Amino acid sequence: MVGSIVADAMRAEDVAAGKAEVLPEELDLAEVPEEAVAMGLPDAANEFGGAVERSGRKDISLGRNVHSTCFAVTEPDADDEETGDREAYMASVLARYRRSLVERTRHHLGYPYNLDFDYGELAQLQHFSINNLGDPFIESNYGVHSRQFEVGVLDWFARLWEIEKDQYWGYITNCGTEGNLHGILVGREVFPDGILYASRESHYSVFKAARMYRMECVKVDTLITGEIDCADFGKKILLNQDKPAIINVNIGTTVKGAVDDLDLVIETLENNGFKGRFYIHCDGALFGLMMPFVKRAPKVTFKKPIGSVSVSGHKFVGCPMPCGVQITRLEHINALSRNVEYLASRDATIMGSRNGHAPIFLWYTLNRKGYRGFQKEVQRCLRNAHYLRDRLRAAGVSAMLNELSSTVVFERPPDEEFVRRWQLACQGSIAHVVVMPNVTIDKLDHFLDELVAKRAAWFPAGGSQIPCIAADVGEENCACTLHRC
Ligand SMILES: *Cc1c(COP(=O)(O)O)cnc(C)c1O
C-alpha cells in the first residue's frame, strides 16, 4: 500500500513532531510511489500534459492528455487515523513538491514573472474565504471581502494612468487575459459592429476574445521589433471605413517586448476619418506597470483617447497567485453591466466569484515599494537586460533588445534539455529571457556560463552552423556567418 511504503521512509513521530520536511536523503526512489518520484525529479516535474517528445522538440498533440506526472487521489484506509500513514504520505509528497519548486524557481528565466517576494505577513489571512464577487464599488451581501483593499489599489492605478476617481471604473482580475477579455468586450459594447484590429504579435488572448465574441478580427503586420506597423494598419482600416475600429495596442508584446506606438496608432485613426469612431484597449499585461518608470518612454494615459488598460499583477509586481488590474472609463461600464439582486451588487466583471486575496497582495507590495521602489526595480531590470544582451553578443550569439524593454530575444538553443532547464520561452527559431526584478547578474552569469559552454558543443568548428535569425531580429542583431561582421 502506498501509505505504508512512505511510512517506512518517514516515521510518524517525525511528522507529529513537526519534522515532516526532513526526508532521509538515502530514500530509495524505487520504493516511493511513482507519482511522488516524478515530482521529486526536477526534469520530470517540468513535463506537461499533452506534450510528447519527438526529435528533441516538444510537440503538443491535441486530444491526448498525458497523466504520467499526476499525484493520484487515493481514498483513506480505515486505519489511517491510528497509524498516521496518510498524514505522512501527504507530508512527504508536499515536501518533495516544495523542493522541486525551489529548484524550478532558481532556474527560471523565460517567463515574465517576478518570483522574488515575501508575503509572510499575509499568511494569517489564509484561513479566510475572501471573495469580492460583484462590483468592487458596490458592496454585496457577502461580508468576507476585501473591497477596501481592491479600491485602494485601483485608485493607485487610476492615478498612474491619469484618470479621475469619479471618471474611472475597474477591478482586480484573475490575470492579464481577463483584462483583455474585458477591455475588448467593453469596446464591442461601445461599438457593436466594430472590427477588432490587433498586430500579429499580440497575445493569443486577444484572438481568443475575437473568437469568443464572434467579432470580425483583422491582423495587422509588425515591424522587425515586434511593434505594430502603422502603415499596414492605415491600409487595413481604410478597407473597412464604414465600420468603427476596436484596437488592441500592446504595451510590451509577449515574445519581443515591443511597445506599440500609441500616438501613431491614434494619429493613423484620426487621419483616416475614424475620429470618435474607435476604441483602444491597451494590453499592458507585460510592461504596463514598467513603462511609466522608463525615462523617455511614451505615456499611457487616459488623457489620450483610450478606452481601457490592463496589466498582470503576477508579472512585474510578483504575486503567489495570478492576478491583474483592469481600468476603464466609467461611462462605458453602464452599457455593460446588469444589476443582480442575488448579489445585491452589479455584474460588470467577466468572472463571478473573484479572488479577494489578490487585492491584498497587490496593496501590500504597492505600499511597501511605492512609486520610487518600482522605479528603481525597473531601472535595474533594464540595466540587467542590457548586460545580458551585451554578453550574448560578445559570445557570438544573435540577440536583440528593444529600446523600451527588458526582454532579450536570442537564437533558440538547439538543446531541448537546456531550454527546459532554464524554462526558456521559445517561438520558432528564437527564445527569450524576460529580465524581471528577481533576475540578478549572478543568475544571468550562471545562465551565460552554461550557455557558452554548451554552445561550443552545439556549434563546433567556428560556428558555421549557427542559424540565421535575421528575419526575427534584424540583420544588425544576427550573428550567423553571413551577417556577423
Ligand atoms: C502575459 C501576457 C498576457 C496574458 O496575461 P496572463 O496574466 O498570463 O493572462 C497578455 N498580454 C501580454 C502582452 C502578455 O505578456
Image (cartoon, rainbow, N blue to C red):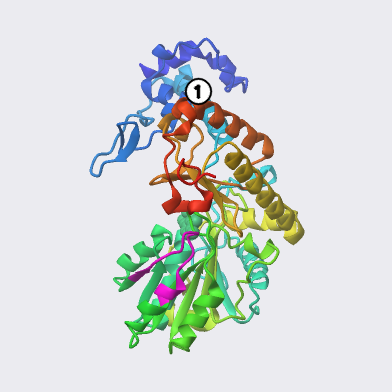
Q: Is 283 above or below relative to 125?
A: below
Residue 50, percent from left and from top: 30, 39
Nearer to me, 389 or 418: 389
Magenta region, residue range: 218-233
Nearer to me, 302 or 257: 257
Figure quadrant of residue 184? bottom left
Number of marks drawn: 1
Residue 341, percent from left and from top: 43, 74
Quadrant placement of the C terminus: top right
**The CB of the residue at mark 1 lies under 8 Å from ligand 1:** no
Q: Is 20 above or below relative to 451?
A: above
State whether residue 353 appears in this view. no
Residue shown at 62% from the left, 20% from the top: 17
Q: Is 1 above or below relative to 441?
A: above
Q: In this view, does 100 lie to the left or right of 231?
A: right
Q: What element carries label 1?
A: helix
Please tell me how crowded label 1 is: few (under 14), some (14-19), or many (20+) other residues with Cα within 10 Å: many
Figure quadrant of residue 108? top right
Q: Any magenta on residue 228? A: yes
Residue furthest out toward the left: 63
Residue bearing mark 1: 92
Q: Any magenta on residue 313? A: no
State whether residue 110 appears in this view. yes
Nearer to me, 127 or 337: 337
